[in-house]
Amino acid sequence: MSNTTTLEEANELELELTVNELLRVQLPDDPNSDNYYSRIENIEGKMLSVTLPTDNRGAPLPIHPDMMLSFSLVRDGNAYAFNGLVDKVPDRPLPVVTIIVSSAIERIQRRQDFRVKCLIPVEIIAALPEVSSELKPTVLRLKTSTYDLSASGVSLRISMSIPVGTFPLIILSLPDEGSRIRVSCRVVHCFAAPDNTGRFHIGIQFMNLEENNRARIVRFVYRSQLKGIRK
């Protein structure tokens, strides 16, 4: 069996798949699909052998033959996606599933959708709206850690709420050799975190992220996913 699939072998795919490629797996109608991962073990024509998809805790997913899955991957900062039909599910303990590639692999504009849970030092500076016309806005300056991160935004879990529509400045400290990332943002959602700790889940969208910093975040997210799948 070869280690790559050619354009001719895979319906003129726009990208060659390679052994050890990290894949994100999406299940039909599953809201948690962003947290499922697999890796290519072998390639033969349009047949892929992939590790049994698992969640972030390593629990295997309930997949079965004839189930259609959506796969995506990141290569050189670009995102690609394709569909695959589950052909064979292994008898345990061999965690390898056979997939029939059933669509072309196409580049997609979804780099920002690749998200990873991580604790990255972050500082948030925001002018919170006044509660009455007689009060001045409150300036919030908070140092905390991210809850998760993507190239389109970041989320936090903190002990206070921040109104939707607030425009904070975010300062991220990625664990690479680059400088801190300063970017203007917008709060897109704020709700009580489901862990009953009294914290709030704050979703923040980047507004003017420079392309070189976007590429740094994409690399960090991809490498974090790869590290997780190799554990």
Image (tube, rainbow, N blue to C red):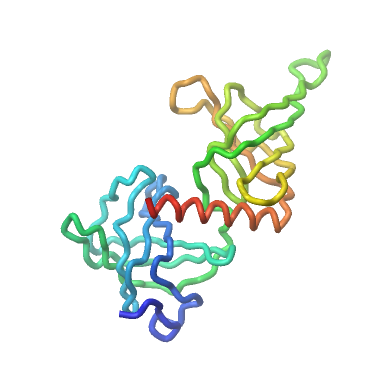
What residue is drawn where x is 83% and y is 13%? 134
**Residue 9: x and y, percent?**
38, 84
Corner quadrant of residue 182: top right
In which quarter of the view is residue 169 placed?
top right
Is 23 drawn above or below residue 150 in the view shown? below
Name the residue nearer the viewer: 5 or 187. Answer: 5
Q: Nearer the viewer, residue 55 or 166?
A: 55
Residue that lies at the very extreme toward the top in this rendered image:
134
Looking at the picture, does residue 73 appear above or below residue 168?
A: below
Q: Quadrant of residue 28?
A: bottom left
Return the x and y of residue 108 as percentages of the image width and height.
Answer: 55, 65
Q: Judge from the rendering whether residue 60 lies leftward or rightward of residue 126; answer left or right.
A: left
Residue at the image point whose x is 32% and y is 64% from the top: 50
- The mark total stands at 0
Residue at x 50%, y 51% (from the top left corner): 224
Q: Is residue 37 above or below residue 194?
A: below
Q: The N terminus appears in which quarter of the rendering?
A: bottom left
Q: In this rendering, is residue 119 above or below 219?
A: above
Residue 230, x across and y down, in percent: 39, 54
Q: Position of residue 96 (x, y in %)?
A: 26, 62
Instruction: Please state if 118 lies on the left or on the right of 23 as rendered.
Output: right
Residue at far front of view: 177
* The furthest residue to the bottom: 8
Name the residue nearer the viewer: 212 or 156. Answer: 212
